[in-house]
Image: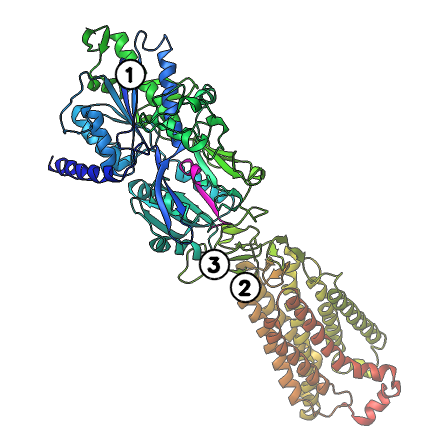
């Protein structure tokens, strides 16, 4: 109570100061429009707004208040609803509703003065005293900022007097404990933030500026908007909170204007009250932001009422307006409104004076009779007076019907009727309306359901409007879309993009992004100390792609094993299956070499069979020679197991055949070398050694060495046999099919065993190289083992440095080279004697050089 008393004292002082500066019939705190009825509704509407007029020759701008014609639409909606109800025999029969309209000023003191006049019935108010002869008020309708509505609600709450607010929904006023008799006609704006973010993401915008009124409503809206933006990957470029009650000068307005002007962001969301300092700020700088995209609510429609609309920065703005049905009689009713029809309406008289030049009487403050019917509101441009019912007017209309339906229920059911008859009228105590207003549900004349219970109005559907500049110089609102939170995600926003007319100079859909979207093949790389929407674009790593844009390229996607990325990193292509094929030049070359060498070996074998009785063939055991030629033939032919598409059989035969035939070949060379040594020893040690070479003892070396290799291969095949495998990484764009060795240890043990045999053969042959014999081939055996060892020693590093099918080619080449080395070093000299110098291939020459004993 001390707070209310101090408030009333401040109110008296402000009234005295205000009366000293206000000229008569211009505007007055006590302006009131009254129409009598059996039951009265008191209404407080913001009929005046701030305006700025530039002063000639100065930069300063004068700020004053003038009647807002678009706000007067609220009065028309009120009168329409009252007249429809009074002429409707189905609602409140034999009773009439009246109204008393007061102006709700921007300041709390001025509005509270009118409120006290309403309560007490006297211009000179005494708090808590009622000087009215008869109290017929049953409800109060208010449309002010929440601070003023909360003060009125606090006072009315003491008397449980119903209060219906028609402004935007205020969460702070939705508290039955603090405001037991306050009802909000507007639904919760819980879907507004979601709708705006849906619009932003539809156009792939992600860099947004916020200009918000610094009040409870603005803070609540931001608390819903920013989380929605974060969930959708939208970043805040800047956020300016504008004090609601601040009076701007040109100097201090730059404090709020500069961040907006300097920032390159194209998209700005405005949320606040147009009649507050935020509205004044943007009227002062309405030509400073051309080329921007503004997203706001229907409360900002009037701010685009500019004389040169083509230069207006709000051209192309997108407006979220609550979706509701249209009252069919509204436009017809607007045409009939004039001072002659409502001669006691001082607000209408001032409107006619401003727009139609109809002078007002200084005595009666009414329009002169000779011009009272001049003009019509429908002739005014829409940005001065819109014949389409606004959200506020729709709520006023519903509020009147809510009171009427409540009174009708009380009349029909005769609930707690006080004073059954009082001069032919029935009086209802205002506090008794509350229990019905809390649960009232009805359908208004437009067919829309109406309820005052906020828990049943959780979501709101929005029409999306766009300001057009057609014809040139005039503004026109066009519905370009709709947002409905009741639909499934992804279908909530419906938009006709081709119908949108963007700001002047923008021929196509503008972009508001911190960084341009990464093109396919690139991914986002965040910038240090910057928002998530600010990034650089870097090329995707090898074998990874990105084929989307914007938020869809945060990461590159790795191609599957059977696919590879194209050079642009935009698509995964199917890899081609490859192996060492006969159709490839390399495979064909190796196959031809293998065939040629095997053919040559067979020809040598045939030649040796033909000349088997000659000394050069008989020398050093012809049987071992035949075994060596046969094994070399298989060595050359086993190369074919490595060429062509591998399968399980070929993979097993590759290593088995290779190991066995080479073991036979090397062990045969070892046996031949030992035979040479034993042959020489038999001639020098006597007759006891002569029969040893003929006994076949050196030939035992071959099966023994081969058996060891076979046993080893058997263990290999049982424990970890070779198998068909795929290499998807070695060659770009190719899947290489190859034979996996199964056990790398077994493979290298195989090579090690062959290496030991070959080194042993080399050492033995090297020691016997200078033994005297006519056809001594110890030197040739030495060279053959030297070539063999050199090839396979070089094979190891080369094999490990290659990949894919090249590894197979290296192994085949090593097989051919080592086999060709043995064939050439051992048999070319003998073939030379057989075919080029046959005279040396005789027993006579042989005996001449060396004689067996």
Q: Cβ–Cβ below 8 Å for labels 1 and 3?
A: no
Question: What is the distance, in whole Å, between disc 1 and disc 2 at their CAs?
Answer: 106 Å
Mark closer to the observer (1, 3): 1
Mark closer to the observer (2, 3): 3
What percent of the width, then of the height, locates residue 269?
Answer: 42, 45
Residue with the mark numbered 2? 743
Nearest the eye: 35 or 761: 35
Label 3 crowd (10 A; few <14 / some 14-19 / many >=20):
many
On the rendered image, what quadrant is the C terminus found in? Answer: bottom right
Nearest the eye: 385 or 496: 385
What percent of the width, then of the height, locates residue 315?
Answer: 51, 43
Span shown in magenta: 289-303
On the rendered image, what quadrant is the N terminus found in? Answer: top left
Mark 2: secondary structure: loop
- Residue 385 seen anywhere in this rendered image of the structure: no
Residue in the image at 36% along x and 25% along y: 75
Residue with the mark numbered 1? 36
Residue with the mark numbered 3? 535
């Amino acid at each position: 109570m001390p707070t209310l008393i101090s408030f009333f004292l401040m109110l008296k002082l402000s009234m005295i100061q205000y009366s000293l500066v206000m000229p008569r019939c211009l505007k007055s705190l006590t302006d009131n429009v009254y129409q009598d009825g059996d039951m009265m509704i008191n209404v407080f509407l913001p009929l005046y707004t701030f305006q700025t007029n530039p002063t000639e020759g100065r930069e300063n701008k004068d700020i004053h208040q003038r009647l807002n014609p678009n706000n007067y639409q609220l009065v028309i909606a009120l009168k329409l609803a009252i007249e429809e109800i009074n002429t409707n025999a189905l609602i409140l029969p034999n009773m009439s509703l009246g109204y008393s309209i007061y102006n709700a000023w921007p300041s709390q003191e001025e509005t509270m003065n009118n409120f006290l006049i309403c309560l007490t019935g006297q211009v000179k108010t005494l708090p808590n005293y009622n000087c009215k002869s008869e109290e017929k008020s049953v409800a109060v309708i208010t449309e002010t900022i929440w601070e003023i509505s909360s003060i009125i609600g606090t006072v009315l709450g003491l008397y449980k007097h119903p209060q219906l607010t028609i402004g935007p929904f205020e969460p702070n006023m939705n508290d039955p404990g603090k405001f037991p008799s306050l009802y909000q006609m507007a639904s919760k704006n819980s879907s507004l933030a979601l709708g705006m973010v849906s619009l932003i993401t539809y156009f792939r915008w992600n860099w947004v500026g916020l200009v918000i009124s610094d009040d409870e409503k603005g803070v609540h809206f931001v608390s819903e908007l920013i989380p929605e933006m974060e969930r959708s990957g939208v970043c805040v470029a800047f956020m300016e909170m504008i004090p609601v009650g601040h009076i701007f000068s040109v100097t201090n307005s730059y404090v709020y204007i500069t961040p907006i002007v300097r920032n390159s962001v194209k998209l700005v969301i405005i949320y606040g009250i147009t009649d507050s300092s935020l509205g004044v700020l943007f009227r002062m700088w309405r030509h400073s932001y051309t080329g921007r995209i503004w997203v706001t609510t229907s409360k900002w429609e009037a701010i685009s009422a500019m004389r040169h609309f083509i230069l207006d920065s709000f051209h192309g703005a997108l407006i979220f307006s609550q979706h509701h049905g249209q009252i069919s009689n509204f436009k017809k009713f607007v045409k009939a409104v004039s001072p002659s029809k409502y001669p006691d309406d001082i607000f209408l008289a001032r409107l006619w004076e401003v727009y139609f030049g109809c002078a007002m009487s200084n005595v009666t403050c009414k329009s002169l009779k000779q011009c009272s019917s001049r003009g019509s509101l429908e002739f005014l441009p829409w940005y001065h007076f819109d014949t389409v019912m606004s959200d506020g007017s729709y709520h006023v209309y519903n509020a009147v019907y809510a009171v009427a339906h409540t009174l009708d229920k009380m009349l029909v059911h005769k609930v707690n009727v006080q004073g059954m008859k009082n001069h032919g009228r029935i009086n209802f105590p205002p506090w008794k309306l509350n229990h019905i207003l809390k649960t009232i549900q009805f359908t208004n004349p437009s067919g829309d359901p109406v309820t005052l219970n906020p828990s049943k109005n959780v979501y709101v559907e929005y029409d999306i409007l766009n300001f057009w500049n057609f014809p040139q110089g005039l503004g026109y609102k066009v519905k370009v879309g709709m947002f409905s939170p009741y639909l499934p995600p992804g279908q909530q926003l419906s938009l006709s993009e081709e119908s949108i007319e963007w700001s002047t100079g923008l021929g196509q859909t503008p972009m508001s992004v911190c960084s341009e979207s990464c093109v396919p093949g690139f991914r986002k790389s965040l910038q240090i100390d910057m928002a998530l929407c600010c990034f650089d674009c870097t090329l995707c790593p090898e074998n990874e792609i990105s084929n989307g844009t914007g938020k869809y390229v945060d990461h590159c996607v790795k191609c599957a094993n059977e696919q590879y990325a194209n050079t642009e990193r935009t698509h995964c292509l199917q890899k081609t299956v490859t192996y060492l094929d006969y159709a490839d030049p390399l495979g064909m070359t190796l196959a031809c070499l293998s065939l040629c060498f095997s053919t040559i070996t067979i020809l040598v074998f045939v030649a040796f069979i033909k000349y088997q009785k000659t000394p050069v063939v008989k020398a050093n055991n012809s049987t071992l020679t035949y075994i060596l030629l046969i094994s070399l033939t298989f060595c050359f032919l086993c190369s074919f197991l490595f060429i062509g598409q591998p399968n399980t059989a070929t993979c097993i035969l590759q290593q088995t055949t290779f190991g066995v035939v080479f073991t036979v070949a090397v062990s045969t060379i070892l046996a031949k070398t030992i035979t040479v040594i034993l042959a020489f020893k038999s001639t020098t040690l006597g007759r006891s050694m002569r029969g040893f070479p003929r006994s076949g003892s050196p030939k035992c070396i071959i099966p023994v060495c081969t058996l060891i290799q076979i046993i080893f291969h058997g263990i290999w095949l049982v424990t970890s046999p070779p198998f068909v495998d795929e290499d998807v990484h070695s060659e770009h764009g190719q899947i290489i099919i190859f034979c996996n060795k199964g056990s790398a240890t077994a493979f290298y043990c195989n090579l090690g065993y062959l290496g030991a045999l070959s080194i042993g053969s080399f050492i033995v042959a090297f020691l016997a190289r200078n033994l005297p014999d006519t056809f001594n081939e110890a030197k040739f055996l030495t060279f053959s083992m030297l070539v063999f060892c050199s090839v396979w020693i070089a094979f190891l590093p080369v094999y490990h440095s290659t990949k894919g099918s090249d590894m197979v080619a290296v192994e085949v080449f090593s097989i051919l080279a080592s086999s060709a080395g043995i064939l050439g070093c051992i048999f070319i000299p003998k073939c030379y004697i057989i075919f080029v110098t046959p005279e040396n291939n005789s027993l006579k020459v042989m005996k001449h050089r060396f004689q067996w004993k």
